[in-house]
Image (cartoon, rainbow, N blue to C red):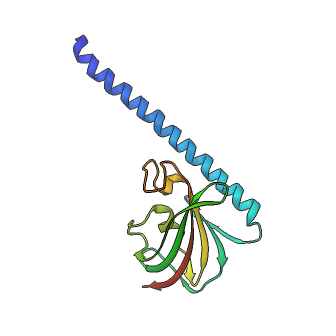
Amino acid sequence: MKKSLLPAMLILCLAVLAACTMDEKLSTCVKQEESIESYIESKFADSTVVITENGIARIVMVHGNGPAAQKGDSVLFSYKGYLFSKGPGAQFAEGRIKERLGDRHMIDGLDEGMVGMMRGEEAYIAFSARYGFFDKATGAVSPMTPLIYYVTLENIYR
């Protein structure tokens, strides 16, 4: 009887430990989201700011025109990716790509943050690690790092 309980207890302990770790990670994400919100309130009080239902922030720097990008549209855009630390920190990426919104080929923060952008629009898109690389290290991005991108939407293809 005792031998059969040992594996079950070990599995239960590991599950509890994993749950605590996940709670800590999610708590970190909440703090990051609060920091992003505070940054926006202090630096962009007079700017157009769009917040998605998941808390991803788009700060419009240059307004675009025409129809807004929707899930399912392909978008051509250039970007610069920065680590977020009370604003844009070290740049870790730069490029120009064409992707379909909603196909999950990009990190969720960019994918969701670009919905609603118009051709010619330039914006910062800021989000917690929850919508970035979360607990995975990727190149110069450490696990649990909030990100901010500067995006220029060049074209929308329906």
- Expressed as whole percent of the image width and height from the top left, the position of residue 138 reads 42, 55
Asked whether residue 70 is in view, the answer is: yes
Give the residue displayed 65% in from the left and 74% down from the top: 60
Q: Is residue 117 left or right of residue 104?
A: right
Q: Position of residue 37 (x, y in %)?
A: 67, 57
Residue 67 against residue 96 in the figure, above or below:
below
Residue at the location (48% across, 56% down)?
A: 140
Q: Considering depth in this image, is 114 or 94 the residue closer to the camera?
A: 94
The quadrant of the rendering that contains the C terminus is bottom left
Of residues 17 and 90, the one nearer the viewer is: 90
Q: Is residue 69 above or below residue 135?
A: below
- The residue at the far bottom in this view is 66
Q: Quarter holding the N terminus?
A: top left
Q: How many discs appear?
A: 0
Name which quarter of the figure residue 122 lies in.
bottom right
Residue 114 in view here: no
- Residue 100 at x, y percent in the picture: 40, 75
Q: Residue furthest top?
A: 2
Percent of width and height locating residue 8:
29, 23
Q: Residue at x 39, y 65 (%)?
A: 104
Q: Is residue 134 left or right of residue 64?
A: left
Q: Is residue 18 left or right of residue 28?
A: left
Quadrant for residue 63, please give it: bottom right
